[in-house]
Amino acid sequence: MGVRSDYWEQIRASGFRLPGDRPLDDLTTELVQMIGDPDPDVRDGIAYPVLATWVEEGVYDDLLAGFGDGVSEGLFTGLGEDVTDSVLRRSFSALLLAEAVLRDTKTKVVHSDAIFRWGDRAASWFVRERDLRGFVEGRGWAHAVAHGADLIGALARSHHFGRLELTVLLDVVADRLLTPTSYRLHHGEDDRLAFAVMVVLHRNQVGIDVLEPWIERLAAALVAPKMDDHETAPEWPTPMAGNTRAFLRSLHLLLALGVRGQQTPQDLALFGKPPEVRADLLLVLLRVLRGSIPGIAAPPATPAP
């Protein structure tokens, strides 16, 4: 598998304890390369859990800004390619960068400049990613959209992000959904994206004045194009329209049901109460979703006189 397999198997068997026989820099460099390995046992079974455990346990706390900078470079490895193994490095770099952001949310050890830099890189990668495969035969999970959603959700939790930055994250989600693609997302990406937006909503910094036009922008993708008499109707819904509709349905459901995050003091506090915009946004989503299935959804009830 291109790495010292016995060595890393021993670390996995130890519960991912940090070994003392090699410099941390060397171990990190090797593991970061491994997160792009086409073998899922190397990538998903060793490299990611080892690095995520070390981040969570504070191994990188004094080095977290540099660690995140290095990991974020992997977001651009082979960017623009489709149906190649390079997506694995990009996707798992996003998942690992999310761990670094969440660690800073707990410890506040990274300057805001670094978090903003990671956010810029995440946004640039996410809207430009072309390879949206979920599970890949022989490779395991690629899941770039789901992992990108997890990164958006981590950034949305950051105390460095205020109303402006949270609004930008919403636009990034919309840009991702509205970018034409041939991929239909059917491995839970809609739920992961909706949860990321729920994190933004729970911050209670973005009002309905921003959210309603944002929803309307997405809803415009749900309207089938009008065709002239001589034109052949295209496939409908297109993958982009179908993905967007699935996302809006998931967002409506999560807003109605409520969500929970990790069992950390930060998430318990964040998700302890419904977002302040819940009632207003539910009405907007109901209107949009009703309009997306005309002839099937019942019309709004007429108020009693």
Image (spheres, grey):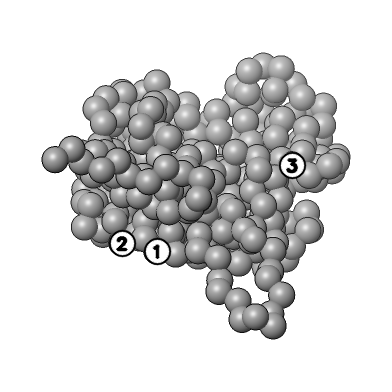
Return the residue at label 1.
Answer: 217
Mark 2, secondary structure of its residue? helix
Q: Is the N terminus in the top left, top right, bottom left or bottom right quadrant?
A: top right
Instruction: Please name the amino acid that badge 1 sits on.
Output: Arg
Comes first in the chain, label 2 or label 3: 3
Tag 3 secondary structure? strand
| Nearer to the camera, 4 or 263 | 263
Where is residue 156 shown, x and y percent of the image?
35, 46
Q: Which residue is mark 2?
A: 213
Instruction: Give the numbered dot on residue 135.
Output: 3
Between marks 3 and 1 in the image, the one whose residue lies nearer the viewer: 1
Q: Marks 2/1: CA distance?
A: 6 Å
Which is more toward the observer, 120 or 153? 153
Q: Amino acid at mark 3?
A: Phe
Query: Marks 3 and 1, how far apart in space?
Result: 29 Å
Asked if residue 41 lies left or right of residue 228, the reply is right
Q: Which mark is residue 254?
A: none
Residue 305 appears in the picture as rendered:
yes
Q: Position of residue 125 (x, y in %)?
A: 55, 62
Mark 1: few/some/many CA within 10 Å (<14, 14-19, 20+): some
Quick check: marks 2 and 1 in contact, CB under 8 Å?
A: yes
SS at badge 1: helix
For image coordinates 38% across by 27% down, the residue present is: 257
Q: Are marks 3 and 1 in contact (CB under 8 Å)?
A: no
| Residue under the point 21% across and 51% down | 207
Q: Amino acid at mark 2?
A: Pro
